[in-house]
Image: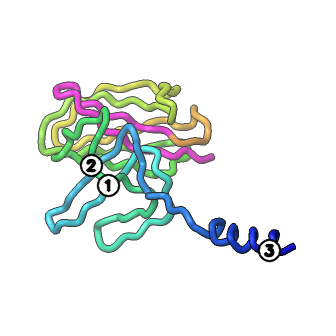
Amino acid sequence: MKTLILMFTLLIPSFMMAQSVERKVIASGGTNTVTATGVQVSQTVGEVMVKSFTPGSLIVTEGFQQGSSTLIGIANGFDATTFTIFPNPVGDLLNLRITSTQSLDLQLSFCDMLGKQIAIPSQRVTVDGSRNESFDFSVVTTGIYMLMVRDMASGSVKSLQVRKVD
């Protein structure tokens, strides 16, 4: 009995040692932005979203953030271009507003989270200032999709997440 008590006394502290996991993601895409005021915001494709905060015009979402701005496979060539998708989540009709200070020749395509193209056909559009496009999402099932925007001149690619609901 003394041996059993001694064994439990020695083993219990070793079971109580905690482990910690660093919140870091290795991902195939994302972006890292530093504003003029020095605020750094990063995102990762496929990142789990927990909660969003909106102090002013900045949206901060907590979740797993990458440790650095290393990008694999996605170029960042859309500095003077803004993309607005609405409504998101989308029901039947998705709207895209592209605003740019430069003339762009873009390829717009949708894929699922596995990278397979979905039933919405690709479009090639020219943007000179501002342009609005609409996409029929009634032909796809509920899920998460990516809008891939490719600049045909530079090869830069930007991905935007679209959530489809019924």
Q: Is disc 1 surrounded by few (<14), some (14 to 19) or many (20+) residues within 10 Å?
A: some
Q: Nearer the viewer, residue 105 or 138?
A: 105
Give the residue pinned by disc 1: 42
Q: Is disc 2 surrounded by few (<14), some (14 to 19) or many (20+) residues within 10 Å?
A: some
* Quarter where residue 106 is shown: top left
> Are the residues tagged 1 and 3 within 8 Å (C-beta)?
no
What kind of residue is marked 2?
Answer: Ser
Q: In the drawing, what numbered circle is on residue 107?
A: none
Residue 158 position, x and y percent, is 30, 38
Judged from the image, the secondary structure of the residue bearing numbered disc 2 is: loop
Q: Is residue 112 above or below residue 1?
A: above
The reply, left or right, for residue 74 in relation to residue 164 is: left
Magenta span of residues: 145-166
Q: Residue at x 34, y 45 (%)?
A: 30
- Is tag 1's residue or tag 3's residue first in the polypeptide sequence? 3
Residue 105 position, x and y percent, is 21, 29
Q: What kind of secondary structure does the magenta stretch mostly adopt? A: strand
Give the residue pinned by disc 2: 69
Residue 46 position, x and y percent, is 46, 45
Q: Residue at x 36, y 52 (%)?
A: 66
Question: Separation of disc 3 and disc 2 at Cα?
Answer: 53 Å
What kind of residue is marked 1?
Answer: Ser
Q: In the drawing, what numbered circle is on residue 5?
A: 3
> Are the residues tagged 1 and 2 within 8 Å (C-beta)?
yes
